[in-house]
């Protein structure tokens, strides 16, 4: 599964370099990849963008954020 997670993050970074704005459909996959790879720093950076784009109230995005932080040991 880690190879797919790396592919997800690679595609996300490629789209970011093309100035494609991520949305509430994009972020759950990126957060799940960060969780599976245990990449806390990338996950936190993505969380910053989620807040910037005001998508942290989206139910699915919020759930994936909760799962990610719980996996990283920070349930709050």
Image: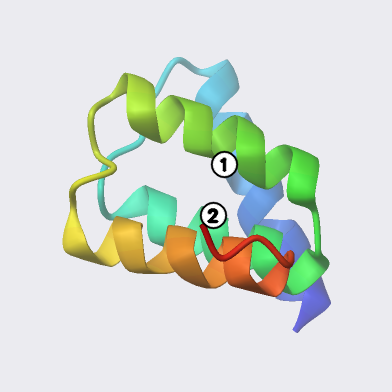
Identify the residue under disc 1.
Answer: 12
Q: Residues within 10 Å of mark 2 (few under 14, many from 20)?
A: many
Instruction: Tell me if residue 16 comes above or below residue 38 in the rendering.
Output: above
Residue at 56 percent across and 65 percent down: it is 75
Residue at 35 percent across and 68 percent down: it is 63
Asked whether the residues under the numbered discs 1 and 2 touch, taking CB atoms below 8 Å apart as contact, a structural biologist would say: yes
Instruction: Tell me if residue 2 comes above or below residue 44 in the rendering.
Output: below
Query: In this rendering, does residue 21 appear at all?
Result: no
In the rendering, at what x and y percent does residue 32 appear?
Answer: 56, 67
> CA–CA distance between discs 1 and 2?
7 Å
In the rendering, at what x and y percent does residue 36 appear?
Answer: 72, 73
| Image coloring type | rainbow
Residue 71 occupies quadrant: bottom right
Frontmost residue, 14 versus 25: 25
- Quadrant location of the N terminus? bottom right
User: With 13 as the anchor, is 23 left or right in this view?
Assistant: left
Chain-order first, disc 1 or disc 2 = 1
Frontmost residue, 73 versus 21: 73
Instruction: Tell me if residue 48 comes above or below residue 64 in the rendering.
Output: above
Residue 62 marker: none
Q: Secondary structure at mark 1?
A: helix
| Residue at the left extreme of this rendering | 58
Q: How many marks?
A: 2
Residue 30 marker: 2
Residue at 63 percent across and 31 percent down: it is 45
């Amino acid at each position: 599964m880690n190879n797919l997670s790396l592919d997800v993050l690679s595609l996300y970074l490629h789209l970011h370099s093309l100035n494609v704005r991520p949305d509430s459909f994009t972020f759950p996959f990126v957060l799940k990849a960060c969780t599976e790879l245990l990449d806390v720093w990338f996950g936190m950076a993505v969380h910053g963008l989620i807040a910037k784009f005001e998508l942290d109230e989206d139910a699915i995005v919020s759930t994936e954020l909760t799962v990610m932080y719980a996996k990283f040991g920070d349930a709050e």
